[in-house]
Amino acid sequence: MKKLPIVAIVGRANVGKSSLFNAILDHREAIVAQEAGTTRDSIWAKADYNGQHFWLIDTAGIKDAEDDFEFTIQEQIQQAADSADVIWVVIEADALITDEDRRVAKMALKTRKPVFLVVNKFDKKLKAIPEDYQRLGIKPIILTSTTQNRGIEDLLDQLTLAIPHMTEYEANDRMHLAILGRPNVGKSALFNALAKKQQAIVADRAGTTRDVNRTIVRYKSKEIELMDTAGIRRAGKIGQGIERFSVIRSLAAIEQSDVCLLLMDANELHVTLDQKIAGMVKEAGKGLILVVSKWDSLDKDAFTRDSLAPQIVNNYDFVPWAPLIFTSSVSGQNVTKLFDLLLDIVDKRQTSIKTRDLNRWLRETVDKHPPAGLKNRMPKLNYIIQEEDSPINFKVYGAHTKFLHWSYKRFMERELREAFGFDGTPIKFWFFEKHETHKHGVSPTKERNREIRRREHEDKIS
């Protein structure tokens, strides 16, 4: 696969880098707020303009590094600039040029890469004169306003002249893995261990990651997108503004994923919020792996794991299909095994069962243990269909299905898993009355019977 051009957006804090990033992508990818220093990690996203594909990096604001944590952020900005093919230096039109602006321009020019000067917020009154911009030594100079969407096309037109034309089509079989958990349970450390590079910032403080950080890796010839999310807190603990957006972004990452890793701190197991996050993943219909992180930090002996595992499994009895693994990002214990579990779960999520085999299973299950009901209201299950576009969903047609007890549905799930697998992923049954009439007065029975016969005919041919 050819390397796509990389465009890095750099500048001092609060000049509108994230707003420009979102304007290019035409949707809210980075978090935008009035508070200076909102962006901490370098956020990557793939952009497309008139068929030209390129990577776009939104970096934190450049300033003096006052501590080790801030130094890590500034170091990451330098790495983003060094890896870029084009650098956009963003300054404010409604402010005089500062020493920080000059330092950013000098850093960008030292890379000897094509550099653009983006004067943002030009819809406001210009404080500097054109000669001041020219003294920075950067050409071209482009005026933009993200609030009014002005100058964006001119910026992109200039960009396409500076980079080679490349188009990349995302592989249809790319897998998406989201790393979830409470703040400070080691998500970014695991993200780095999986990505084998310092993509996210790792610090021993809660709430370091605010945006969903992404990178793509290859494992056994498969493309995997890793998503490092912000920590999910209890509803009463979520602050207003930026932190609330971060949590919303984490929830969106669940929807975008195929499989989720739920990280639990080995020193803080049996937390109710962890169970709630697992429930959210189950409700979203995504694969799930329970990960005990920081295993190296625990004082343990040869029997610790065997004593803890049953307790954890008992706490997560509502997702008995989710595998449990103990990891350490520091020592690398079981980190690679997570990729093997991911590949296995994605494969199980795509399991296709022949319709005749499904209905044979349904008959045997009902004969083995008929469903109970009420007098003259005995549930009957006639046939079952697996959804083609979502193989983990099964539609069951019958009579009086609303009287099915929840325990019988759980029994059906256990039997189906025993017969066909689906380890690591939830499965869902949808029950329909065979003779139920639609609101338009058309019974679905005949159409469904035709669908059953068509599928069974295809099965026989294959």
Image (spheres, helix red, strand yellow):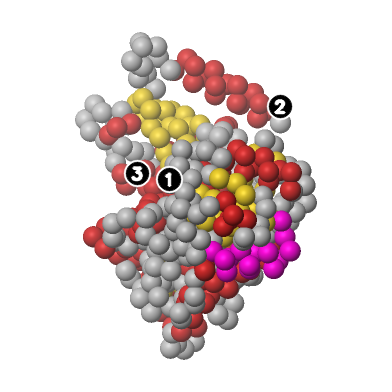
Give the residue number, with chain letter if any, for mark 1: 124
Q: Which comes sooner in the sequence, label 2 or label 1?
A: 1
Q: Count the labels in the image.
A: 3
Q: CA distance from mark 2 to mark 3?
A: 34 Å
Disc 3, SS: helix
Is the residue under label 3 in contact with that under label 2 (CB below 8 Å)? no
- Chief secondary structure of the magenta portion: helix
Disc 2, SS: helix
Is the residue under label 1 in contact with that under label 2 (CB below 8 Å)? no
Where is the C terminus found, in terms of image quarters?
top right
Residue 191 to residue 405: above or below: below
Give the residue number, with chain letter if any, for mark 2: 461
Q: Amino acid at mark 2?
A: Ile
100 in magenta: no
**Is 295 displayed left or right of 410 in the figure?**
right
Residue 70 horizontal/vertical position (percent): 48, 75
Q: Nearer the viewer, residue 130 or 191?
A: 130
- For label 1, the crowd category at 10 Å Cα-Cα, with few meaning under 14, some 14 to 19 and many 20 or more, is few
Residue 8 to residue 402: above or below: below
Point 39% across, 11% down: residue = 442
Q: Nearer the viewer, residue 392 or 298?
A: 298
Residue 246 horizontal/vertical position (percent): 39, 56
**Is 73 displayed left or right of 460 in the figure?**
left
Point 46% across, 53% down: residue = 127
**Is 372 displayed left or right of 183 in the figure?**
left
Q: Which residues are magenta?
A: 101-114
Q: Which mark is residue 408?
A: 3
The nearer-to-camera label among 2 and 1 is 1
Q: Which comes sooner in the sequence, label 1 or label 3?
A: 1
The nearer-to-camera label among 1 and 3 is 1
